Amino acid sequence: MTCLRPFVVFVLALAACATHDARPERRFSGFLDDYSLLRPGGPDDVALVYRNVDAEWTSYDRVLFEPVTLWRSGRHSLDAVPEGDLLRLVTDLETAVRRRLGAGFALVDEPGPGVMRVRLAITAARATDPVLDVLRARAGVRTTTGDGSLDAETRRFVDRAQIEGEVRDAATGRLLAAGVDERPRTGAPPLATWADVDRALDTWAGRMCARLESRTRGTR
């Protein structure tokens, strides 16, 4: 997949780094339907990726982009991280991807022929957990503002979270691509401030969307 570094998730691969470390214990949230399809990504790709070899990418020119969510193991599993920070991460990722998608595709609100449905989530949960909580940006809820330093717990969360994502045919539900990405353990620039995070998100969104554009235009 292209926009979602072939996809998809979401970690914060905020880093926009081309290499990924092998991690012996990778935990999946259950956001994606079938993790067995995923394979290690190549250079400049997401950590794990699936692409449907039969997908007719050039038949798509519009995107239905669903709101980004955050999946956690119960409502209190991330109590150490300020709630406003979690909501900002969700909002900033959605904003970065929507802005970049809108530069290359028509964004629509309904499924139909030629429409891809894109879903992304920041995940810090295991599908085996008895309770999963899905956090969404909500009107009237205060999020962290400014470009200043990250809270220490927020920084630790960003370093270990994942981004998961998928692209489907919006009309039929057919899976076109899926992926899981994460922040590299080594070689990634430090994320000490919100300005660092937003730059990393913008870079990640740009690479993801450029890849999606190249496939739908038949250049890759």
Image (cartoon, rainbow, N blue to C red):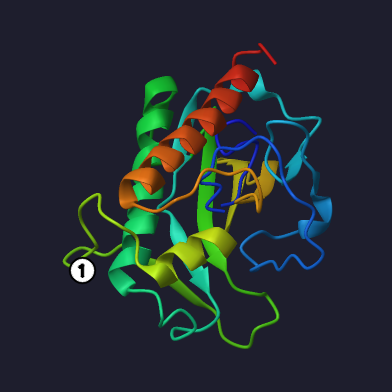
Q: Is residue 146 above or below residue 19?
A: below
Residue 208 placement (x, y as % from top left):
55, 33
Q: Is residue 28 above or below residue 55?
A: below
Number of labels in the image equals 1
Q: Residue furthest top?
A: 219
Taking the image as shown, residue 184 lies to the left or right of residue 48, namely left
Indicate the quadrant where residue 207 lies: top right
Q: Is residue 97 visible?
A: no
**Could you tell me which secondary element the residue under label 1 belongs to?**
loop
- Work out which quarter of the rendered image holds the N terminus and state it: top right
Residue 129 placement (x, y as % from top left):
65, 84
Residue under the point 57% across and 39% down: 4
Residue under the point 70% across and 24% down: 56
Taking the image as shown, residue 145 lies to the left or right of residue 47, namely left
For badge 1, the amino acid type reads: Val
Q: Residue 18 or 125: which is nearer the viewer?
A: 18
Q: Residue 51 or 21: which is nearer the viewer?
A: 21
Q: Residue furthest left?
A: 140
Neighbour tally class for label 1: few under 14, some 14-19, many 20 plus, Cα within 10 Å: few
- Work out which quarter of the rendered image holds the C terminus and state it: top right
Residue under the point 51% across and 69% down: 71
Residue 2 placement (x, y as % from top left):
60, 30
Q: Is residue 59 above or below residue 209?
A: above
Q: Is residue 194 visible?
A: yes
Residue under the point 69% across and 35% down: 45
Q: Is residue 39 above or below residue 125?
A: above
> What residue is shown with label 1?
141
Taking the image as shown, residue 47 lies to the left or right of residue 156, namely right
Q: Residue 179 or 159: which is nearer the viewer?
A: 159
